[in-house]
Image: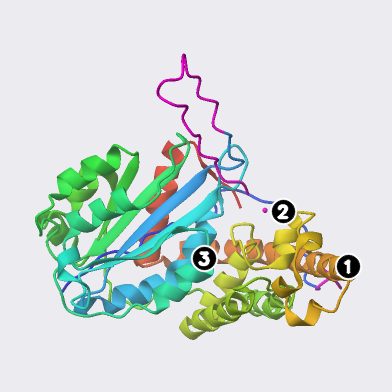
Amino acid sequence: MKATLFAAIILASGLVAWKYKPTYSLPGKAATRTAAVPVTPPPATAPLPVTPPRPARDNTRIQVALLLDTSNSMDGLIDQAKSRLWNIINTLTTLKFNGKTPDIEIALYEYGNQGLSPSNGYIRQVTPLSTDLDLISEKLFALRTNGGDEYCGAVIRNAVNSLKWGSDESDLKLIYIAGNEPFNQGEVKYATAAGEALGKNIYINTIFCGDYTEGISTNWKDGADKGKGKYFNIDSDRKVRFIETPYDSLIASCNDRMNQTYIGYGAHGESKKSSQLSQDANAQSVSKMNFTERTVSKSKSVYRNDSWDLVERSQKDKTFIQNMTKSELPKELRDKSVPEIQKIVAAKSRERDSVQKVIGELGKKRQQFIDEAAKKSGTPDDLGTAINRSIIQLAATKGYKAEL
């Protein structure tokens, strides 16, 4: 019986009022970031060195590391993570800092799996902090459970020291760890690991899979207290309950049109476009409502694919197309002139923008429906709801506001 977390973020319930005129018909035709540049210090012998200011990023970052126990008894936890991934992402996108949507980066760890190396404490970094949400989904759906030893302190320390955490004061940095074995197992003391996290302004949130008081007696609450985060308990074997809405089918019908606006380029264009379809299928395998959540996520700016999608890349770099080699283009565009390619890409961009606006309008109506239904019937705790509550609370302390 072992477990550990999948972390993320989620907001929903009507925290902000919104007004709009819904449009249900699909328009005919129809959608960017900068990275900090490292500063190279001058030679030690240089007189009176002056360090140039670090270029400011357009956006702050929300960084979430999900530490999931993949030992034998954690199949239910992994299923909840799969079911709630896109819902958590959509909650994250409601958070604004100074009126802007932050960049969202998610990392994934597994621990407590007997198939992992004992020399590494049965810990594996599945993905680093990444904006590639399809990659996170792909790796999450590939996780398999196997018996092992769970060392919470060790996996927290690994995440704190191995991931590339932001240094801006406004960055929101969170670790989520879930499980049902005592929190104090292993040679690395969880209090020490939590102290190292706080030194980087990273908050530790713990989710115990079992009885609330048992989680307290096995140090899960103390782990959250030491990490200045939140403690929750859930029934990891409970199936996630989705609220069906009248808008799910309308939103899902937009997905195919949106997919047709992607043009893969470069060495990974074809494989990444195929992965996009695979993650659509994974989401749909969970439920129709989960697939709808993913479609809503895909309509937002945090769903970033400029590393392989020519439409998005050309929006960021207006000269990119004219500087491409033929080998970087998909086969169907290699016999086209630069003006012809630019015209095709521009048409795809307009089409995507149109479809995304429709999804955005329907998504707001859908969320309002869900919020009202949840107030009447209540929503049982699961991994997603636990993460959602803590994200909203911790984000508020950093000056983030929730807006639909």
Using the image, determine if residue 142 lies above or below residue 318. below
**Front residue of this view, candidates 39 and 215:** 39
Q: How is the image coloured?
A: rainbow
Main secondary structure along the magenta-highlighted residues = loop
**Cα separation between marks 1 and 3:** 28 Å
Q: Which residues are magenta?
A: 26-54
The spot of residue 101 in percent (x, y) is 59, 48
For marks 1 and 3 on the same chain, the one whose residue lies earlier in the sequence: 3
Query: Where's the N terminus, which quadrant?
Result: bottom left
Q: Residue at x 47, y 14 (%)?
A: 48
Say which quarter of the image contains residue 85.
bottom left
Q: Are marks 1 and 3 in contact (CB under 8 Å)?
A: no
| Residue assigned mark 2 | 316
**Cα separation between marks 3 and 2:** 19 Å
Q: Is residue 106 left or right of residue 269?
A: left
Is 50 covered by the magenta stretch? yes
Mark 2 Cα-neighbour bin, 10 Å: few <14, some 14–19, many ≥20: some
- Residue at the far front in the pictured view: 45
Q: Residue at x 85, y 65 (%)?
A: 342
Q: Residue at x 34, y 44 (%)?
A: 202
Q: Residue at x 45, y 34 (%)?
A: 169
Q: Secondary structure at mark 2?
A: helix
Specify the label residue 343 is tagged with.
1
> Which residue type carries mark 1?
Lys
| Residue assigned mark 3 | 133
> Which residue type carries mark 3?
Leu
Is 208 covered by the magenta stretch? no
For marks 2 and 1 on the same chain, the one whose residue lies earlier in the sequence: 2
Using the image, determine if residue 104 lies above or below residue 24. above
